[in-house]
Structures are given as structure tokens and as C-alpha cells.
Amino acid sequence: MKRERAVRLTIVGFGHVGGGVAEVIMRKHQELKEIYGLDLRIVGIADLKGVTINEKGLSEPEIAKFRDGSVLAGMSTEDMIREVEHELMVEATPTNVVDGEPGVTHIVTALESGRHVVTSNKGPLALQYRRLTELAERHGRELRFEATVGGAMPLISMIRNNLAGNRIISIKGILNGTCNYILTRMGEENLPYEHVLREAQEIGIAESDPTKDVEGIDTAVKLVILANAVFDMDVTYRDVKVRGITEITPDALKLAHDAGYAIKLIGDVDDEGRLEVAPRLVPLGDPLNVNGTLNVATIRTDLAGDITVIGKGAGPIEAASAILSDIIGIYAR
Ligand SMILES: NC(=O)c1ccc[n+]([C@@H]2O[C@H](COP(=O)([O-])OP(=O)(O)OC[C@H]3O[C@@H](n4cnc5c(N)ncnc54)[C@H](OP(=O)(O)O)[C@@H]3O)[C@@H](O)[C@H]2O)c1
């Protein structure tokens, strides 16, 4: 039996991902105690409605009441981060690639208050990676962000832990499930882009404003996080050459297929440190040729050769999986 350690955490941003984190922590509470000796307690939750707290740990009924908009504590999100005693904040507010807010303020406040931070929010990492990682280091706290790239796919932790000792030469992959779904359906059914986009919106795979996905911005943001975290670069998404999928036609997909290729939206940090997002020809037999909403990344290393990871790039429970594994990584060493 492991020695038990109580870890109090807050969740800031209680939408799909924040809610998924709470669900997973509740569902796995006993298992996490038995396997890792971790007694995870959610002591505060904040979203735009307000804040709810229970310093002993919120129960499922208390969380349900918060969802319904009741039992609000009269404090701001930042006051909760500063004043409620806890060890770790999960940040899951919407990604903003203009100034990174409100995520940047939440993360800075948490680190300056001595909390570890685990986030799924891409904006702060894509815009202020250096500042935030240096702040974490200065305060002796951890800032982890596996969920920001490739959802459940263990990319950053795999490179840092399991490929330690390797030089990473390049990384390329499909980092946006919406684009991959659209290109897959267009190719399989010989349908035009606009038709498949509408279909993807109807079934909830594409957002009502799909610009960030289809113009390649979301892929670029993830590429930047990988470049900074893995190659120690200091780039923002404005440093990426980006072209999306809006001009691809069913005819182009068919021509490519007849010649033995698929067309995929590929994000690439190459061996000279260039960052590019563009539709590329991928041989049909290449491990990068995955279909539907799947994500994939091939990491080229000097010792281990090419390693390819495939997985679900989005979804609340998938993102919660990455967040939980970051939390466990901080405490169960
Ligand atoms: N969904 C996925 O599969 C996935 C996967 C990986 C990463 N991500 C990233 O994870 C983050 C969360 O995604 P999501 O799908 O959970 O988004 P979401 O469903 O829109 O949830 C966002 C939450 O943040 C809250 N919020 C907004 N501004 C806030 C503020 N100033 N203070 C406190 N809370 C605030 C919202 O409150 P209200 O509910 O009151 O509006 C909402 O609860 C995003 O950055 C996203 O890019 C998502």
C-alpha cells in the first residue's frame, strides 16, 4: 500500500475539458489512491458564471449544483487561485491566439501563488512559452501542457521521458482532427469541400466558425508548442508559414490517390527548424496516412529512428486523460 498524499486542485474553465477532468478524477479517485497514493480533491471550480469552493473537496452533488448555476462563492477566479489553499490548478478556458487571455493571467497568478499548473489551453503556450516556463522555474513549480497538442496522444511526455538521450531531428504530423475528417470524407465520397464542412458542422466535428481549423491556425499553434517544448525554440504562431485546406478539390484528391498518395494537412518542424503547415502529398502506405478525426505524428530521432504516434486528438475525456497523466507525472515520480 502506497503512502497517501492529498493533492488539492482547482479547475478554471468548466466546459467540455474542465468537466471531463472532474468526471475522470471522481471516477478514478479510489484507483489513483491505490496505485499512486494520490488522493486528488477538487477544492474549487471557476467558469464565467462564478466560483464554487469547498476546502475539504467538492462532492459530486456540489459540482452538479455548480453546473446548474447555484452555490456560488462571492469571489473572482483570480481570488480563488490566490486565496483558496491548493497545490495545483487545471486551466481549461478557451484558446485565444491574439493575447492568450484569460489563460495567461490565470497561469501567471497560479504560478506566482505557488501552484503547479496543468493546462489544455493552447493560447498561453503558443504566445508566451518562454515567459511562462521561466516563471514556473523561478517559483519552483511545474507547468505541464500535454493536452494542448494531440489530445490524448502522449507526445511531449513521450519525447521528454521515453526518448531521452535521443536528438529529435524533426516532427511532422496531422494535428487537427477536423481537417483530417474533411479531407478523408472528400476523398472517399468525391464530395466538395463546402458540402463536407457543412456535414462536419452538423455532427459537431467542425465548429460553427471553422476558420481556425480549416485555415491551419490550430495546427500552427500546436506546432509552435511542440517547437518550443521539444526543440527549445522561442517562436510564436506568427512564425509559422500556414496554408489551410479550403482550396483542395475532390479532383485533386482523386488525382493524388490514383498516383498512390493522400493529401493531408501536415504540420512540420523540419531538420533546419522551419515551421510550416500546408496540405502535402503523403504516400498511401505511410504511417502518417491516418483517416477520419485521428491525429498522428512522426518523430525523427538520431538513435531510435522514426517513431509514429496515432491517437484521438480531441474530446473531453481524451484531453482529461492527458491532464490526469500530467498531474500524476508531477507527484508520482
Ligand atoms: N475540447 C477538446 O477536445 C479539447 C482538446 C484539447 C484541448 N482543448 C482546449 O482546452 C480548452 C477548453 O476547451 P473546452 O472544449 O472545454 O472549451 P469550452 O467547452 O468552451 O469551455 C471553456 C470554459 O471556460 C470558461 N471560461 C471562459 N472564460 C473564463 C474566465 N475568464 N474565467 C473562468 N472561466 C472561463 C467557460 O465558462 P462558461 O461555461 O461560463 O462560458 C467554459 O466553462 C481550450 O483552450 C481548448 O482549445 C480542448
Image: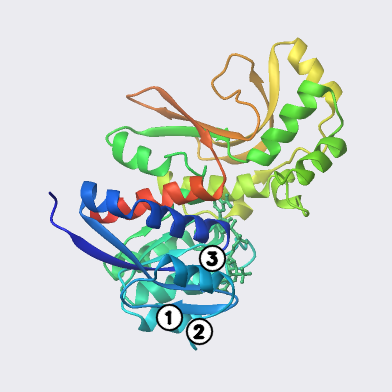
- Residue lying furthest bottom in this view? 74
Q: Is residue 197 left or right of residue 100?
A: right
The residue carrying mark 2 is: 76
The residue depicted at 64 percent of the width and 27 percent of the height is: 291
Give the quarter of the image for residue 145.
bottom left
Residue 14 position, x and y percent, is 54, 65
Counting residues from the start of the chain, the first of labels 3 and 1 encountered is 3
Crowd tier of the residue under label 1, counting other residues whose Cα lies within 10 Å: few below 14, some 14–19, many 20 or above = many
Q: Is residue 135 visible?
A: yes
Disc 1 residue: CB within 8 Å of ligand 1: no
Disc 3 residue: CB within 8 Å of ligand 1: yes
The residue depicted at 69 percent of the width and 11 percent of the height is: 260
Dots 2 and 1: beta carbons under 8 Å? Answer: yes
The residue carrying mark 1 is: 80
The residue depicted at 81 percent of the width and 16 percent of the height is: 255
Front residue of 297/91: it is 91
Describe the element under mark 2 as helix, strand or loop: loop
The residue depicted at 81 percent of the width and 39 percent of the height is: 199
Q: Which quadrant of the picture is home to ligand 1?
A: bottom right
What amino acid is labelled 2 in the image? Ser
Residue 143 position, x and y percent, is 37, 60
What amino acid is labelled 1 in the image? Met
Describe the element under mark 3 as helix, strand or loop: loop
The residue carrying mark 3 is: 14
